[in-house]
Image: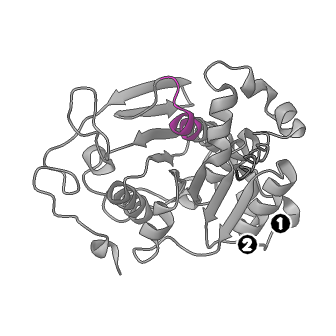
Amino acid sequence: MTDTPAASAPPPRAPLFSPEEVERYARHLVLAEIGGPGQQKLKKARMLVVGAGGLGAPALMYLAAAGVGHLTVIDDDEVSLSNLQRQIIHTTAAIGRRKTESAGAFIAALNPHVAFEGINARLTAENALALVGGADVVIDGSDNFSTRYLVSDACALAGVPLVSAALGRFDATVTTLRPHEKAADGTPNPTYRCLFPQPPPAGLVPSCAEAGILGAVAGVAGTLVALEAVRAVVGFGEGLVGRLLMIDTLTMRFETLSYGWDPDNPLTGENPTIKDLSGHRR
């Protein structure tokens, strides 16, 4: 008779969070809407942030503080003195440094449990799908319409949720896009092109340098962007899919505009004409 070897005990599972992380995220862990399972989702999440400027700066700070496990930032700009009035992830000592390097240093100091990747480049038709496809959520903090349409098209084609925002002098807008999914009535969720079919003519909308901007407006919108991104990962409350949040700080009014899928939109409409990003190549 041959002895049967005893089955080896499975190796002990590593704890989900270290004692330091439990204390760090304690206020999330006691929220029923987040708790341990939600915080674990955040720890496993990968997010791509397009731009480390006015919107990206506060969004990155709150995402890092929230414990998002991996943050990738793409930006080809350097920190300038005029940025510091609103791009609060950067400091005076960072003037002249790449924004990705400056943001990475801040995030490392804020939360060492977050893996950070900085890409010193512009988002282009050639790299967009690869970058977007590696993320669970994308945040568009860009400051121009060409990038805004590029990232929204790329996210729709890749089936990745996008949180998109824009800034004005005293106003801002925020929305969440999930066109790869359907609404409760069975229709597709809208795309960015359902909301804004065409970009405005060149020169019609003045740049931030030309028109100015109240610095705290970027903080308000960037923080709401971070909230939407956290919501997209954890899944609680009612988000901004199919709704455009409009913020007017001159009158201190927050209003929402509902919008839906346009069957004529060229990306996910009944007869789509945009099937890749070739139209964005210069």
Classify 237 as above or below 73: above
Classify 135 as above or below 28: below
User: Hey, which quadrant is residue 106 in on the image?
Assistant: bottom right
Q: Position of residue 79 (x, y in %)?
A: 73, 67
Label 2 close to label 1 by CB (< 8 Å)? no
Local crowd size for mark 2, using a 10 Å CA cut-off: few (<14), some (14–19), many (≥20): many
The front one of 57 and 152 is 152
Q: Of helix, strand and loop, which mostly describes the magenta segment?
A: helix
Q: Residue at (32%, 47%) from the top-left corner?
A: 180
Q: Position of residue 7 (x, y in %)?
A: 72, 46
> Please, which residue is most extreme toward the front here?
1
Local crowd size for mark 1, using a 10 Å CA cut-off: few (<14), some (14–19), many (≥20): some
Q: Residue at (30%, 62%) from the top-left corner?
A: 201
The front one of 251 and 154 is 154
Residue identified by numbered label 1: 94
Give the secondary structure at mark 2. Answer: loop
Classify 101 as above or below 68: below
Q: Is residue 250 magenta?
A: no
Give the secondary structure at mark 1. Answer: helix
Q: Would you say 169 lies left or right of 38 here?
A: left
Amino acid at circle 1: Ala
Q: Residue at (59%, 53%) from the top-left corner?
A: 46
Q: Would you say 229 lies left or right of 27 here?
A: left
Q: Position of residue 215 (x, y in %)?
A: 67, 45
Q: Would you say 184 lies left or right of 5 here?
A: left
User: Hey, which quadrant is residue 10 in on the image?
Assistant: top right
Magenta residues, as a range? 228-237
Which circle marks residue 98 in the picture? Answer: 2
Amino acid at circle 2: Arg
